[in-house]
Amino acid sequence: MILAGFIQASNCSNYTGSWRHPETDHSFLSPEYYQSIARTLELGKFHLAFIDDRLAMPSQYGNSFIDSVNHGIRSVKLDLVPVMTAMGLATSNLGIGGTYSTTYHHPYHVARLFATVDHMTKGRSALNVVTSLNDAEAQNFGLLEHSNHDVRYDQAEEFMEIAVGLWESWENDALIVDSGSGRFADGDKVKAIDYDGMWFKSKGPLTVPHCPQGKPVIIQAGQSPRGREFAAKWAELIFVIFPSLEANKRFYDDIKEKILSYGRDPAKVLVAPAIYVVVGDTDESALAKFQEIKQLAKTVDSLTLLSEVFNYDFSQHAIDEPLSDSDLESISGLRGFLDRVIGLSGTNNPTVQDFITYSGRGTLDELPTFVGSPSSVADNMQDWFENGACDGFVIAATHMPGAYEDFCSMVVPELQRRGIFQDDYRGSTLRDNLGIL
């Protein structure tokens, strides 16, 4: 199985309450913080670490960012490339990924950035492609509101066509660099792309020669019908959030069929659900840790993050008030997450409490959580892996860096003992190590 660490360049992990944990390291503004996490994951033979991102503070709840700032609800989001570079310089084998929006960045800029990161890490870069979520992000880029869900995916299609074209604009052997003859490169092996689309235009070629992997590994997390089509066409690692083995298996079977329909090899596109892990020496000690960590969440965390992810202000409703059809139609954020809430709640008009309960936003219930001894956690992971639910896992941290330290020292050896996780890295690039050459 493959393992990825899901990192936040932030004051908290994916679990917003993590910053309140007494053992959390609060030096999130220092390079050493991220380098330490990267070294831990590399010692644990993780395939990669990738960093999530948002382009605005959560500010939809109550039409204000005050709660986000006051309660530390993802109010800090650092720029990713310096963080990725710091992590890459501290490691030799760990893949390093970052998230970029196809809605608010030009593909030339992103293609150039990630080709450079791939060179600087000697072939260990990954790009997590997202279409962004809400109006606050739009307003930070000078727009009034976030664009329609399907329009964002139309833009993303053009974005990827340009980015891939630019990464391929230098042939692998175009560089000559012969100072004796004075010949630097073969101009016949460097091409313009002359892309003229509805959303983006780019002439090319890229100013960065062909990178070690050819292009960064592409990560994508689309779960809506349109998102699944996009992922099946472009992604090499599909990151998903579903609440159960059965739901993950349904997605796995569906997406592998879609991948095949695009003429791609399903074995070369990996599916990895996000999970939390709380591990202890015994099942009982792990459960006690889990209960303590669970208490760190606040209702305001859930409401703030729900408002952010759905681009909708939940403060206008009482906690037990159902959302009307028109309310639901006005939601423009993650459609796959809305489908989850409606499906699990069993009602077409869920209440605010239903959204908290069945989305799990701001709580440990957002992701499947494996709690127990190293053997018990490994049992769960092996069950999912061997029963067709996934090709591996994205491990989110309940607190930083302790959750990763515990996982790498306790669970990884058990997975290795069972022969279902690598004892060492197989190659020099991320593609080598993922087996997707």
Image (cartoon, helix red, strand yellow):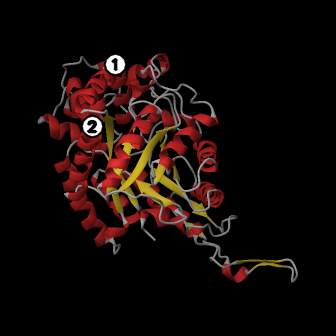
Q: Furthest residue to the left?
A: 346
Q: Which mark is residue 373?
A: 2
Could you classify mark 1 by the number of other residues whose Cα lies within 10 Å: few (under 14), some (14-19), or many (20 or more)? some
Which x, y percent locates residue 346? 11, 36
Foreground residue, 426 or 326? 426
Q: Amino acid at mark 1?
A: Lys
SS at badge 1 = loop
Q: Quadrant of residue 334?
A: top left
User: Left or right of 268: which side holds 27?
Assistant: right
Q: Nearer the viewer, mark 2 or mark 1?
A: 2
Foreground residue, 242 or 402? 402
Q: Quadrant of the N terminus?
A: bottom left
Q: Which mark is residue 191?
A: none
SS at badge 2 = loop
Query: In the displayed structure, would residue 28 be above or below residue 169?
Result: above
Q: Are marks 2 and 1 in contact (CB under 8 Å)?
A: no
Could you classify mark 2 by the number of other residues whose Cα lies within 10 Å: few (under 14), some (14-19), or many (20 or more)? many
- Give the residue drawn at x 45%, y 35%: 135
Q: Amino acid at mark 2?
A: Ser
Instruction: Give the CA distance from mark 2 to mark 1.
Output: 27 Å
Which x, y percent locates residue 333? 36, 39
Which x, y percent locates residue 306? 33, 30
Along the polypeptide, which appears first: circle 2 or circle 1? Answer: 1
Residue 50 in sight in this render = no
Residue 226 in sight in this render = yes
Which residue is labeled 1 in the image? 298
- Give the residue drawn at x 68%, y 64%: 208
User: Left or right of 266: which side holds 42?
Assistant: right
Foreground residue, 8 or 27? 27
Which x, y percent locates residue 96? 53, 51
Q: Quadrant of residue 389?
A: bottom left
